Image (spheres, rainbow, N blue to C red):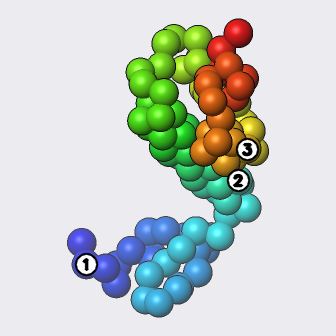
């Protein structure tokens, strides 16, 4: 199938953008945003975990679990605080 044959199959819910056809469904945008945000949060957790392990050594299961539960905003705060924190306990990652 050639690229110029696609518009006929895609229907009227698409609009041409730079020679391509793009879905303009409002239902699709929240799904894409949610998927992007989940991926971004996973990356943020990974980088924070790597920094914590570099500073404090391997993390036990409890701090890893807390990292997995924390919001993006909380991870931002943690990333800044870990620069000067003396321990995982001071960061709220250990009891």
Pinpoint residue 74: horizontal percent, then vertical percent: 74, 39
Residue in the image at 58% along x and 81% along y: 15
Q: Which residue is denoted by mark 1 in the rendering?
A: 2
Element carrying mark 3: helix
Q: Return the residue found at the far left.
A: 1
Which sits in the foreground, 67 or 87? 87
> Where, quadrant-wise, is the N terminus in this rendering?
bottom left
Residue in the image at 65% along x and 14% along y: 94
The first of marks 2 and 1 along the sequence is 1
Element carrying mark 2: helix
Q: CA distance from mark 2 to mark 1?
A: 30 Å
Q: Is 12 rendered above or below residue 52?
A: below
Q: What is the quadrant of residue 25 in the picture?
A: bottom right
> Where, quadrant-wise, is the C terminus in this rendering?
top right
Element carrying mark 1: loop
Let me know if residue 41 appears in the view: no
Let me know if residue 51 appears in the view: yes
Residue in the image at 62% along x and 49% along y: 37
Q: Dot 3, how many residues are within 10 Å of its Cα: few (below 14), some (14-19), or many (20+)? A: few
Q: Which residue is denoted by mark 2 in the rendering?
A: 30
Give the left or right position of residue 91, taking residue 46 as reference: right
Q: Which residue is denoted by mark 3 in the rendering?
A: 77
Q: Is 17 rendered above or below residue 95?
A: below
Q: CA distance from mark 3 to mark 2?
A: 26 Å
Pinpoint residue 23: horizontal percent, then vertical percent: 58, 68
Residue 44, label in figure: none
Give the left or right position of residue 34, taking residue 42 as reference: right
Q: Is 28 rendered above or below residue 72?
A: below
Which sits in the foreground, 27 or 74? 74
Q: Are marks 3 and 2 in contact (CB under 8 Å)?
A: no
Which sits in the foreground, 75 or 85? 85
């Amino acid at each position: 199938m050639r690229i110029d044959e696609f518009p006929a199959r895609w229907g009227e819910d698409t609009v041409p953008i730079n020679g391509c056809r793009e879905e303009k469904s409002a239902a699709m945008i929240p799904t894409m945003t949610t998927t992007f945000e989940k991926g971004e949060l996973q990356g943020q957790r990974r980088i924070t975990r790597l920094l914590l392990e570099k500073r404090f050594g391997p993390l036990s299961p409890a701090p890893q679990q807390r990292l997995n539960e924390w919001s993006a905003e909380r991870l931002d705060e943690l990333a800044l605080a870990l620069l000067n924190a003396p321990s995982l306990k001071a960061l709220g990652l250990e009891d």
